[in-house]
Image (cartoon, rainbow, N blue to C red):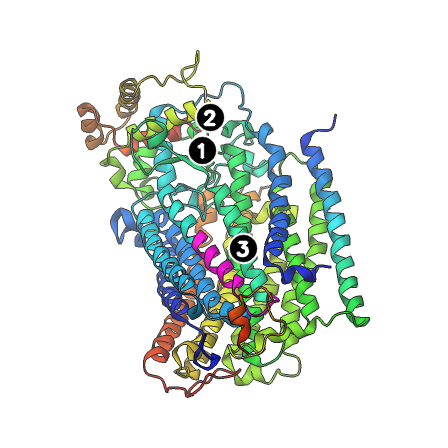
Amino acid sequence: MISLVDAQGYAKIIMTVVLVIILYGYILHLYRSEKKGERDYEKYGKIALDDDITSVPIEKNPNLPQKKEGEK
Amino acid sequence: MFHWLEKNPFFFSVGVFVVIAFAGLVEILPNFAEASRPVVNLKPYTVLEMAGKNIYKNENCITCHSQLIRPFKSETDRYGQVSLSGEYVYDRPFLWGSRRIGPDLHRVGNYRTTDWHENHMMDPKSVVPQSIMPAYPYMFTKTADIDTAYAEALTVKKVFATPYDAPNGTKLGTLEEGRAAALEEAKAIAADMKNKDVKDAVARGEIPQMIALIAYLNRLK
Amino acid sequence: MQSNAALEYDYTVAKLFTYTTILFGILGMTVGVLIAAQLAFPELNYLLGEYGTFSRLRPIHTDTVIFGFMISGIWATYYYLSQRVLKVSMAESKFLMFIGKLHFWLYFVGALAAVISLLLGFSSSKEYAEFEWPIDIVIVLVWVLWGVSMFGLIGIRREKSLYISMWYFVATFLGVAMLYLFNNMAIPTYFASGGIGSIMNSVSVYSGTNDALVQWWYGHNAVAFVFTVPIIAMIYYFLPKESGQAIYSYKLSLLSFWGLMFVYLWAGSHHLIYSTVPDWMQTMGSIFSIILILPSWGSAINLLLTMKGEWNQLTENPIIKLLVLASTFYMLSTIEGPIQSIKSVNAIAHFTDWIPGHVHDGVLGWVGFMTFAGLLHMAPRMFKREIYSKKLIELQFWLQTTGIVLYFTSMWIAGITQGMMWRAVDEYGNLMYSFIDTVAALHPYWVIRTLAGVFFLVGVFIFAYNMIKTMTSSKELAQEPKNQSPMAA
């Protein structure tokens, strides 16, 4: 019978391999979808630079209550 | 795929939590049952030893002393037999330490005596001339907290089913019995000591911290 | 609601935490220098009677730096930058403002109580979690308040997408909450025994080896979630903002965030060294964690690449200098850690000074510099005055860099020396050195380490002076600076 400690070892290795695959698959996905023009990820980097309270958000939060939506 | 998460803080948080919590489950849980089996003949701490352990704990002795002998010849030659998981099952908290500024103490009871500890705690340099350990003279006059130690023993007996009052084991009994037993044990240790304050205190029925600490250190074998 | 022209970011809480960062920084690091000196000159143990021994002071050093300096620094920068990247002011919500202030004051009272309790000799002896149960409860409350404050602000944000820094703050919140709660599970003996003995004493619900597993799962990862994750949150905001360069690659930052979360998942594998897990599994674990470290280096490389084409700023702006050196030290300590967890290296390094050496090149170089840089960047914006002196920042930078280099080089040598002496045998296989020989051999390195600490501490005092002058008597600014922080020569 397989002991709990052995099972832990196997679980670790399998999980690690799966995570490596997911992570590197994720890189591919990110770069591919930007190349195909589906998304522009880099625009979000500007959130830090253009951060005055009067700045226009990159993407507006639609969940805000209406009265705050009214202002511009 | 994932970018959706950055716009949805709730699911983002859930995602992060799942990822970080998983490690704990896989790393820690499987060892739990196995590591809590005591070695044969291991007895729970007596009330006096428990009081000593609490001094060791509260004074952070672990900042300089480890209690973990690793499986190397150089360590077993120096400190004694390799430490086993089952020897620690009554240690709450564990006191392995992480830095050996001073030597390992897991089996210090095998090669140091009450007398040695008494001299050493009063003035470490009198025993080890190059020692950098601070002296702890106040432990010879401060009274050990026996009641708290009893409360702790009673707590682990009730909550974690630590086998006190088992046949051939450590007796706990009532608070009065616990105090009396601690004093008896203390008298035996005081007989091996020469410090007058300590002897007087024990004669009055008080137990100085030093006696409790020595009781604990002598138990470490 | 009125026009946005009147609306400003509200830095009340950020300022309060800035003060405590400086206060606890000085306190924690002064104690650090004192205990370093105690190892070199043991007579210093007797300055304060029983309250001045190494064993009482060491937890005060670690806990004041971690829970005083660092947590304050995290919250100072959090209360500053979260408003800005979410584009919402705390002044817009009375409730959040109240929670923020309550958060600070409860924290401050709790932190003082914690220091006093350690000084009086109440300790659970679990490293970096020494506080007894009443203080643990305060800490949990403070943490919950931060959660309410953070998720409350996220709830009313104008910017839909969370900026990189916010991911790391959320991860800090969740990670520390989970680790702290599980590690500090303890039963107060006073209540469990029906009112006997001291009310402060508690007993851990885990025992022996299990307690060790939980403690080091906490110890390793709490350091990760206090000293790494929130610091990355800071640098992802302050470096782009101060330099005026958008982050080099947002995609890479996404990747390194999730990569890092996964790495921490498995970095704990070095806790299994010399345990009952079969050898080949330990080895496999090490190999994969080294593979997974590549995405975690992504952050550091990403930040350095952000400076591409703008390296001249490194000579012109001392804040950029602090930030760039911080990322460099991050790379150094994240490669050192995995090396130490290799089995044969660990056999020598464990229990020696190499471990504090590793911790300090991370915390002094990476964490310290990042926190100083962040506060210096915030000062002109919070207090609407230019930074008092550029020269003092330069002086601080060089003093502290010297201190760090002295610190880790002396500790590397001390650690390896002692590790080798413990295992040295003569031709007959007998141990060559008694334990005290290996202690005496470290004296010169401990003197150098104390000196290193003095260098760093003097830098901290210079920083504090510079900040106080900036707050009180520097030239006032008409409007908020866009990128580079204005500073007088």
Residue C364 spot, x, y in % from top left: 49, 64
Residue B54 spot, x, y in % from top left: 36, 35
What residue type is disc 2 on? Phe
Q: Can residue B182 be seen?
A: yes
What residue type is disc 1 on? Arg
Q: In the image, is residue A40 above or below residue B165?
A: below
SS assignment at label 1: loop
C369 in magenta: no
Q: On the picture, is C21 further left or further right than C230? A: left
How far apart marks 1 and 3 lie (CA) works out to: 26 Å
Quick one: label 1 or label 2, which is nearer the N terminus?
1
- The dot on residue B160 is 2
Circle 3 residue: C225
Do the CB atoms of the residues marked 1 and 2 lie less than 8 Å apart? yes
SS assignment at label 2: helix
Q: Residue furthest top?
A: B167
- The dot on residue B92 is 1
- Chain label for disc 2: B
Q: Which residues are magenta?
A: C143-162
SS assignment at label 3: helix
Q: Are marks 1 and 2 on the same chain?
A: yes
What residue type is disc 3 on? Phe
Residue C194 spot, x, y in % from top left: 32, 27
